[in-house]
Amino acid sequence: MCCLLISSARDVVIASATCRKWREAYRKHLHTLAFNSNDWPAYCDISPILLEILITRTIFQTTGLQGLSILMDDAGEFTASTVIAWLMYTRETLRRLFYNVPTSPNVNILAICGRQKLEILAVAHNSVTGVEPNFQRFPCLKSLSLSHVSISALDLSLLLTACPKLESLELVDPEIAISDAQVTVELSSPTLKNIYVEAISLDKFILETDSIERLHLRDCALEVFELIGKGTLKYFKIDDVSVIHLDIAETVDNLEVIDVSSFTIIWTKFYQMISRSSKLRKLRLWDVTFDDYDEGIDLETIAVCFPQLNHLSLCYELRDGLMHYGLQGSSNLENVTVLELGWTVINDFFSHWVEELLKRCPNLKKIIIFGVISEAKSHEECQILAKFTSSIVRLMRKYMHVEVQFEYE
């Protein structure tokens, strides 16, 4: 049996309106259907009622639909009865569901699609309430995304319990309801491998999983974040996060990537956490502020602790006449083949810093220099930039085997 590869509802609607064979083909063989306002701007010119009719007619002419995506930005609200009809019609065969339109009143998607064959579920701009793991169970679900969703801390915890095969979790700007004065979320899942958390503000966030491999925290405000696991974490990224107490120490033994940016940390505590990551291959410290700068962060420490490092990214910064990443020691970064260096404010010492780093990376293949250039520059700033450019050109004549790339913003 053949299977239609066209997934955009726009193409289906246009084709089926002009050709009887198309209507027959998508009725029997179409397995994926997507209604996306970015894909077809004409959706935005249709009233919510007419849009519901269009979607209803299209869905109800399919059989065996496995993937349904309804992503309508600024579409207003859909009526609950219509959305329930779509889900009831497709739920027995549906494997993938993406839905981001508010409904009036709220539709309990979990109650309708629970105990079915869903493998991927992404819900936005809706509410999740009254989770009952014994009834609303998702035996096949591997990926869950909740974006701008209202949910209680308890329901979120119960929802993970209801997904025994869950591997990927994405939480974006959720509205988390709590029952006491402290905003605390405790999540546990033995199968989770990938976790992405964005725009969450909590007092305490505890995550327990024995299988986690990737963790990305972005734009969060947390007093306490604790990750409990068994050393399976390979990728850790933290971007524009405010956290007073960060504890991932139990999970770092097999870390391969650490990417930290727009972050304030106490280096001694952070170093104690990651110093056991002897398998680290990529280290990125970008726009990072160290509260305990006088303790010192130098290339010697990086070279000794992370012998397998092959990708190093550092953003140069002077504070009170002192440099964030010192050049102390003599150990080389033998395995580093890619070096990314940048500045927030350029000065004459930056060229010297780049030169010393090049000397410490004998097997370097590529260097990328990132810079920030303001629209209005004084004559002195222009002179510094010109001097830096000339010095880099002269320097790289000594390293003809190294590829050089500049990226300015």
Image (spheres, helix red, strand yellow):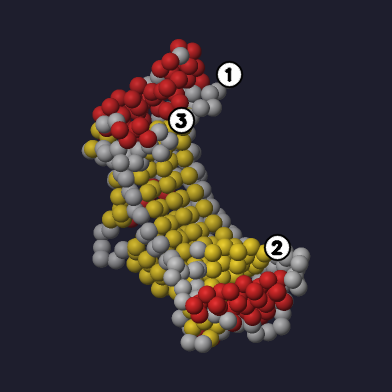
Q: Which residue is mark 3?
A: 8
Q: Residue at label 1?
A: 1
Residue 403 is labelled as: 2
Q: Is residue 92 left or right of residue 250?
A: left
Query: Given this view, does label 3 or label 1 mark the residue nearer the observer?
Result: 3
Residue drawn at x 60%, y 70% is 341
Element type at marker 1? loop
N-terminal-most mark, 2 or 3 = 3
* Above/below status of 337 relative to 384: above
Residue lying at 68% horizontally and 79% vertically, measured from the top left: 356
Question: What is the CA distance from the residue labelled 1 to the residue labelled 2?
Answer: 51 Å
Give the residue type that dot 3 points to: Ser
Please name whichever residue, 68 or 358, is drawn nearer the observer in this view of the structure. 358
Numbered circle sitting on residue 83:
none
- Determine the secondary structure under disc 2: strand
Of all residues, the one furthest to the top in this rendering is: 20
Amino acid at dot 2:
Glu
Most foreground residue, 313 or 158: 313
Residue 201 visible from this viewpoint: yes
Q: Is residue 248 among what the camera can see?
A: no
The amino acid beneath tag 1 is Met
| Percent x, y of residue 226 | 45, 66
Q: Residue 344, image x and y in percent?
A: 50, 73
Q: Residue at x 45, y 12 (%)?
A: 20
